[in-house]
Amino acid sequence: MAAVQKSPGGSIVLKVLIAILIVVLGYTIWFPKQQWQQQARDLKTAQLRLENLHNAGSLFVYFNKRYPHSIDEIVSALDTTFIDAEPVHFEIEVKMNMDLMAEREDLLRVEFRTEEDEQRLTQLQALIRDSLLVTTEDTMRIKDFTIHDLGRNTVAQPDGGGLDLYQVRIVAQVKPLYAGIGSDTLCLDSEHPITVIERKAGDLSRDLWASTQGKFIARPGTTSLFAAGPSARMPVKSYSLSLPLDEIGVCPTTKQPFLMKHVCKYGFKGAYRFTIDGAAGEPITTPGQQHAFLGALKDLASTAIGTVFGVLADSAMTAGNAQYRIPDETQVAVTVKETLALLPKLKPRQELVATADQSRVAGVDSLDYYTADALRTDLLFPEFQGKLAEPFNRLLADERIKDLVARVRMQPALDAVKVDTVGLAVYSPITGEEKYQRGLKRLFEVKPPENHGYIYNGTKSWE
């Protein structure tokens, strides 16, 4: 019987299916990876823009003496604000042997030098080597140094003569952002060849070594090796920001403006005026009002309470206990006792006043919450809890205090909440609708981050 041959169709279909699955698997790895990388780049860009935006807001306050109301106002104002920028300065550190130099100067001042003096001068001239470290601390604006070797030239002197000198000029090159600022020029002149090399103190080092036989000669008519660069009138946006002003207010993912809000200081101030057997006012009803009244009553007894505490502390010191601390229970007992001792001295129509002053810092979007009457009362005259409430709870357990509280009438005097802007907050929200892919690639879309962070009154959320 002839062998039955299997159709190759099934094998081809299987291979095609496997190939399709491999492609799909590749997509499931490749596209999400690309999105995560893009999101990481967006995150870095967003945080850099937030930093620049917050700095721009601070600059706006500096120049306008008030806080901006919008990002557009910041951009518009700083786009037309200029400052007088000083030129870039860099420094030199003299490394020559100053003792040899001083000896040479002394010999040069001798009016009648001997042959030995002349020989010593020649010897010193061979030994002395002027050496300078060319450096800078202005790493924000200076990119590197450029060396211009001018060779040997005849230089006119103030007395009308000329002097053959080797000349090297070193200029600090500023970064593109500060291109409008002038730079000092280090003018190295010497009767001998000048050597300038990189210090090579590290990958980021800009420092140079400059040296010559003898001494570098100051510029004609001066005592300085530096020629001052020009100052410049520069826009603030170029001088103080690391990004272009027109892009710092835009979220790189949503292409929408960042959110900017004021940070406010909410000031609370008020008083409760209590009158014993008063005709006007309202009765004391809430625990906060009771504690405020008893606090004012306790203040009347503060001198007597302090005297008892002083006696206890002195007794402990006399007994040799320098670390004595009055126990909490004793403090409560003394406070209650001395406060109750005041009751016979109180008179009808006598007034007691409880005052309070508080502040809170929060975003301007909290205005409704922080200016509410109920919150004002709770912040200024709260119901005390825990150890702070113990003296009041014991006093309220006494029938004499209960009777006194019932006879008291209260008149509140709460000032309007004072609101002062004290800073700025900038946010980069993510809406959840950002799309990194199109068409069928959307099948492999990954979820965007919740947000890029924020800077709240100078504090960065990512640090």
Image (cartoon, rainbow, N blue to C red):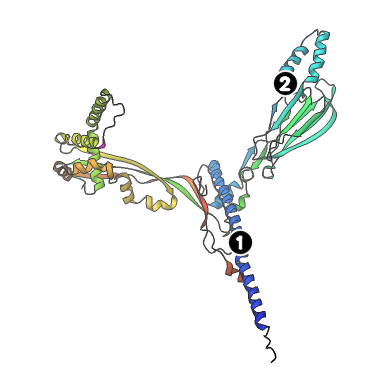
**Residue occupied by mark 2:** 97
Q: Which segment did they paint magenta?
A: 322-328
Give the position of the N terminus as an image quadrant: bottom right
Residue 370: where, in percent of width, then height? 38, 50
Which secondary structure class fits the magenta region best?
loop
* Residue 281 among those drawn in magenta: no
Q: 3 and 385: which one is in front?
A: 3
Q: Amino acid at mark 1?
A: Lys
The residue carrying mark 1 is 33
Residue kind at label 2, given as amino acid type: Asn
Q: Is residue 105 left or right of residue 330?
A: right
Question: How many C-alpha atoms fall within 10 Å of the one at disc 2: few (<14), some, or many (≥20)?
Answer: few
Q: Where is residue 342? Give x, y as percent.
A: 17, 34
Residue 418 visible in the current orientation: yes
Q: On the picture, is 69 further left or further right than 225?
A: left
Q: Quadrant of residue 187?
A: top right
| Residue at the (82%, 16%) spot, across then down | 122
Instruction: Determine if the magenta segment contains residue 324.
Output: yes
Q: Nearer the viewer, residue 124 or 163?
A: 124
Task: Work out whether residue 328 or residue 231 is closer to the camera in this orientation and state it.
Answer: 328
